[in-house]
Every structure is written in C-alpha cells, then in structure tokens.
Amino acid sequence: MSGLIGKKIGMTSIFDENGKNIPCTVIEAGPCVVTQVRTNEVDGYEALQLGFDDKNEKHSTKAALGHFKKAGTVAKKKVVEFQDFATEQKLGDLIDVTIFEEGEFVDVQGVSKGKGFQGVVKRHGFGGVGQATHGQHNRLRAPGSVGASSYPSRVFKGMRMAGRMGGENVKVQNLRVLKVVAEKNLLVVKGCVPGHKNSYVIIQK
C-alpha cells in the first residue's frame, strides 16, 4: 500500500463547484526519503522504510546517523515502513505528494489528542442525571451503580468508567483528496484527521 508520512497543518474549508462549503484538513505530505528497502531474502518480507522531517545531528545516535548515511540523507525525526508499495523504489529515492491524485480516497492514521483523565459523560457519552439512568439520584455527571448484586460480587472487566482519554492510534478511512499542491507539498483532504496541529500522520492510498 503506497503512502507518505506527513504533518497536520490544521483545518479550513473550501467551496466546491456547487457553492457548498466543505470542511477539510491541510497536511504537509512529504517529501520522504527511502531510508531502507526491506527484501524477502534479507528480512523475510518486502517493505519500504521512509524518513520524514530533518533532525539535528547532535540529537541523533551514531547508529542512526550511519543508517541514514547509507541512504545519502540527514537524520530524520519520523521513520515508517510501508508494505506493498505500488512502485519500485531504490535507496535514497525521494517520494513526494505527487503520488496522490485529486478525487481519490486515502486513509490517514495518527495519534489522537490526549484529553487526560475524564469522566463517563465526556468519555463514554453517558446521559447524566437528566436522563436518570444507571441508578443515579442527585449527582449530575456520576456513573451511577456499577456493581453486579451479591453474585458475582465484583465489577465486570470492561465496565465503562472514568479514566484517561485520547492519546491513541486512530485511523480515519476513505477521506477524499480535494487538492494536491505539489509546489508546496500540501495535501487537502475532506473532513478531519486525528492529532493536534503539527503532529505526524501517515497517509495511505
């Protein structure tokens, strides 16, 4: 599956030919360098390792510097492998946003915004005291009863409760590519993608 590493710039909206306002996300997609070519003979599987976003040498290990030197490039902050790449690439090749076309659909994967410790209303969409569910009486956003009577006298695993929310790997599928701005390495996709501004995302065809 062909793809690129990118950086989420932010959200905006554009108008289509019918005058409809479409929400969209702008992604800086590539250019990415092929930093390693995995083969069946050596690694047991076939894949391309791509590197994105230059990294300061003094913040890199000697092993990483040697790895990137083989590809003839500087150290990279983000490295991702893509299996079943559509086109054949060699070590050191540059892959840019032109592998995408306007109108096609892509999957975008990233780490969702971390929201810290949250209650059941925000985390799971409980109704609160307004709908008087889960045995609540006079507490606005409490989870209510979680027990299971005298048998089995414990709380079942997987019970929806308060806890840490966000900061998880999320993939949003079938986002339509609205624009490809090749000279600025920008990709505009319909809808929203996971992560905060300037977070890394993986775009797959």
Image: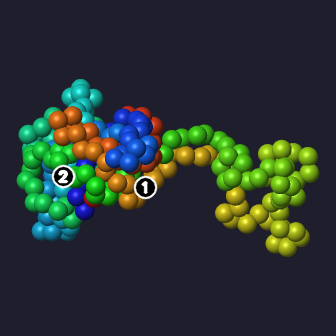
Residue situated furthest right in the rendering? 137
Choose between 181 and 21: the one closer to the eye.
Answer: 21
Instruction: Name the residue tied to disc 2.
Output: 99
Instruction: Name the residue tied to disc 1.
Output: 172
Amino acid type, callout 2 = Ile
Q: Quadrant of the C terminus?
A: bottom left
Please name the residue shown 88% across and 69% down the image.
149
Residue 69 seen in this snapshot: yes
Q: Quadrant of the N terminus?
A: bottom left
Quick one: SS at disc 1?
strand
Q: Is 150 left, or right, of 121 in this rendering?
A: right
Query: Gap between marks 1 and 2, in whole Å?
Result: 19 Å
Q: Identify the image quadrant of residue 81.
A: bottom left
Relative to 36, say whether 55 is above or below.
above
Amino acid type, callout 1 = Val
Q: Residues within 10 Å of mark 2 (few under 14, many from 20)?
A: some
Contact flag, marks 1 and 2 (Cβ < 8 Å): no
